[in-house]
Image (tube, helix red, strand yellow):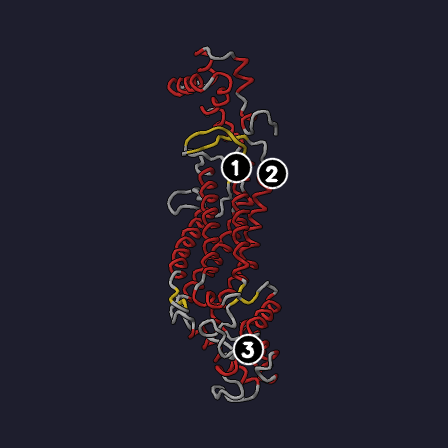
Amino acid sequence: GILKKCAALANGELGQLPREKVDLIVRAAQDVIDGKLDGEFPLVVFQTGSGTQTNMNANEVIANRAIQLAGGTVGSKNPVHPNDDVNHSQSSNDTFPTAMHIATVDQLIDELTPAIRALRDTLHAKSRAFPHVVMVGRTHLQDATPLTLGQVISGWVAQLDQALDGIASTLPAACALAIGGTAVGTGLNADPRFGEVAARKIADETGKPFVSAANKFAALSAHDAMVNVSAALRTLAGALMKLANDVRWYACGPRAGFAELLIPGNEPGSSIMPGKINPTQCEALTMVAVQVFGNDHAVAFAGSQGNFQLNVYKPVILHNVLESIQLLAEGVRSFNDRCALGIAPDEERIRNHLDNSLMLVTALNPHIGYEKSAQISLKAYREDLTLRDAALKLGFVTAEQFDEWVRPEDMTHPLGERE
C-alpha cells in the first residue's frame, strides 16, 4: 500500500498520471495501508520468485477499489487500470524488493530495536544493582576465579549493545530502494527521475530515511542488504541464546543445582511433579534463537541465487527475515517482562559456593608461585580441606598471610585497583 501510494504521487508530480487517477489510487492504497482490504490478499509465500503475483494482486485490488471510489464497475479497468495506472513506471522486479526493504526497515526500527533496548536497560539496571555480589567464575564449565554478578550481567548488556550496533549498521543499505529500476535495472518505461522522487515520497510517508539505490542492477539481482540484516538478526539470536542459557544454568535447582539466581515462577512446570518450576521464558527464547538460525540459513542461500539480472527468491527471503524480526521482538519482550525484570541473586547460596571454591588459590600465585599454589589446591581437593587449612598444613603461608592475600572481593579487578 505504501509503495503504490507513493508511486502514484511520484507519477503525478512528474506528469506521468493525471491528478484524478493519482487521487483515486492514493485513496485506494490508503485503504490497503489501513488494513481495510486485508482479505483481498490470499497469496502465499511460495509463488514466482520475483513476487509478480503479489505485485499484481496489489495492483488489481487497488485498481478495483479506486474504480469503486469513482463509482465504476469492479473489474472494468476503467477509470483506473491495474497495469497502466497503478503499476505505472514499475515492474514487479523493482517493486517487490522495494516493498521488502520498506517492511524490513519498518519492523527493525519500530518493533525490534525498542524491544532490545528495553531488555538492555533492564539488565543494565541489574548490573548496577549487584556490584557487591561476588560469585564463582566458571570457564570450561569448571570453577574459575571470582567476579561480581554485576560484571556477569554487564557482559550480557555489552552483547546486546553490540547487537543493536550490528542492526543499525544494516539500515543504510536496507534503506536503499530498487524502485525506478523497472525490469532489469535500466529504468525502461520510467521517467529518469522516478526512482528518486518515489524514494523521497516513501521516506516522507514512513518517516524512515529511504533513498533511491545507487545501482539498480544490484538492487534487482542481489539482496545483500537483506542477507546482512538476517546475519545481524542471527548475531542477536546468538547473544540471546547465551543470555538465556546463562540465566537458566545460574537458576538451576532449587536444591541440587547452582541455584544462584532466582527467577520468576510464572506457571507450574510439570504435569506430574508437584511444585516444579521450570525456566520457561529462557527455554522459549532459546527456541526463538534456533528458529532464527534456521531462517538465516534460508536467507543466505536464497540471497546467493541471483542469476544474471534477477534474484528469484525474493518472497522466501522476505518471509524469513520478517519472521525472524517478529519472533525476536516478541521473544525479547516476553523474556524481559516475565523473567529479566524479576531476576535476583540468592546471596547466601552464592557466598557458600564462593567460600568452597578451590580457584581462590589463584590469589596466592603472585606471592608463592604457581607450583605451590597448585599443590595447595590439589591437597584441599583430595583431602576435602579448605584452602586455608591445606595452605597451613603445607606450610607455604601463615594464617595472617592467607587471610590478607585470599580475599575474593580483591580478585574481581586487576592488581592495585579497587572498586
SS at mark 1 in the image: helix
Q: Nearer the viewer, mark 1 or mark 3?
A: 3
Name which of mark 1 and mark 2 comes first in the sequence. Answer: 2
The image quadrant of residue 342 is top right
Q: Which residue lies under the disc numbered 3?
A: 191
Q: Which residue lies under the disc numbered 1?
A: 152
Name which of mark 2 and mark 3 comes first in the sequence. Answer: 2
Q: Separation of disc 1 and disc 2 at Cα?
A: 11 Å
Name which of mark 1 and mark 3 comes first in the sequence. Answer: 1
Identity, as a three-letter code, of the amino acid under mark 2: Arg
In this rendered view, identify the residue nearer to me: 184 or 377. 184
The image position of residue 139, as x and y in percent, is 43, 33
Q: Is residue 264 above or below residue 360?
A: below
Q: Are marks 1 and 3 in contact (CB under 8 Å)?
A: no
Give the left or right position of residue 301, taking residue 334 as reference: left
Q: Is residue 126 above or below residue 374?
A: below
Q: Separation of disc 1 and disc 3 at Cα?
A: 57 Å
Identity, as a three-letter code, of the amino acid under mark 1: Val
Q: Separation of disc 2 and disc 3 at Cα?
A: 57 Å
Could one spot residue 40 in this view of the protein? no
Q: Residue at x 60, y 71 (%)?
A: 201
Residue 128 numbered tag: 2
SS at mark 2 in the image: helix
Could one spot residue 81 in this view of the protein? yes
In this rendered view, identify the residue nearer to me: 419 or 96. 96
